[in-house]
């Protein structure tokens, strides 16, 4: 084979590869605007949050801003009758969380939803976990109080909810974790 023919074949292959790469980039979803940067919760904090929330048989745990799914997965692993739902706006995090739940063997008791947490129906939750920013926690508070049943436990990693005093504050690793219990309707 002549050198000219080899160069043409390489050029054609490179051109085809570039076309495929350009097509792949065009099919990717546009980047999402995140209100909170993705920062994974350390495993000792995950365990502390689930302990503070007293996650037990029959609970339905919602993790708002679930990232890689570690809280959802750990909740589902606590008891065979715990269901857990992760909500995140970033499609990459949802794909990663779904794959992580499959690998952990809890896919049948977990669900991951790509959605804005303010659009998520939280009424079935008995526990809600958060690792958001303080301003977002405060903005989310009316939705939590409106949709969640009295007695629902809310646990936040690192940040409080403004003037809503937590029922308990604990330490896990190097972080504070906060627990609130949704009060009866007349006491909000």
Image (cartoon, rainbow, N blue to C red):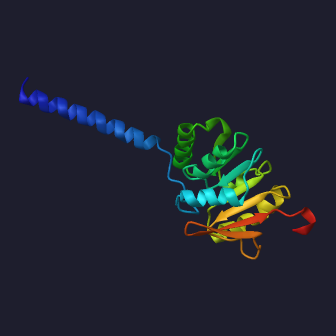
Give the residue displayed 36% in from the left and 41% down from the top.
Answer: 22
Tell me if residue 33 can be seen. Answer: no
Q: Quadrant of residue 144?
A: bottom right
Q: Which quadrant does the C terminus fall into?
A: bottom right
Residue 159 rendering spot, x and y as whole percentages: 64, 70
Q: Quadrant of residue 147?
A: bottom right
Residue 148 rendering spot, x and y as whole percentages: 81, 56
Q: Quadrant of residue 143?
A: bottom right
Compared with 153, 111 (above or below) is above
Q: Which quadrant does the N terminus fall into?
A: top left
Which of the pair 88/124 is nearer the observer?
Answer: 124
Residue projecting furthest to the right: 186
Tell me if residue 10 can be seen. Answer: yes
Give the residue displayed 62% in from the left and 38% down from the top.
Answer: 106
Give the residue displayed 9% in from the left and 30% down from the top.
Answer: 4
Which of the pair 44/177 is nearer the observer?
Answer: 44
Compared with 12, 112 (above or below) is below
Residue projecting furthest to the bottom: 163
Residue 46 rendering spot, x and y as whole percentages: 60, 57
Residue projecting furthest to the left: 2
123 vs 94, left or right, is right
């Amino acid at each position: 084979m002549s050198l000219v023919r080899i160069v043409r074949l390489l050029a054609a292959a490179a051109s085809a590869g570039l076309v495929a790469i350009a097509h792949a980039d065009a099919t990717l979803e546009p980047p999402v605007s995140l209100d909170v940067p993705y920062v994974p919760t350390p495993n000792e904090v995950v365990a502390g949050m689930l302990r503070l929330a007293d996650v037990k048989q029959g609970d339905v745990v919602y993790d708002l801003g679930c990232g890689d799914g570690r809280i959802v997965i750990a909740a589902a692993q606590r008891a065979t009758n715990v269901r857990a739902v992760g909500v995140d706006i970033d499609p990459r995090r949802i794909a990663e969380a779904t794959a992580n739940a499959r690998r952990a063997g809890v896919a049948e008791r977990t669900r991951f939803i790509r959605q804005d947490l303010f659009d998520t129906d939280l009424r079935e939750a008995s526990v809600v976990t958060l690792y958001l920013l303080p301003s977002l926690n405060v903005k989310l508070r009316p939705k939590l109080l409106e949709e969640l049943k009295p007695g629902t436990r809310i646990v936040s990693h690192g940040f409080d909810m403004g003037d809503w005093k937590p029922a308990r504050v604990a330490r896990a690793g190097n972080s504070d974790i906060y627990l609130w219990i949704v009060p009866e309707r007349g006491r909000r």
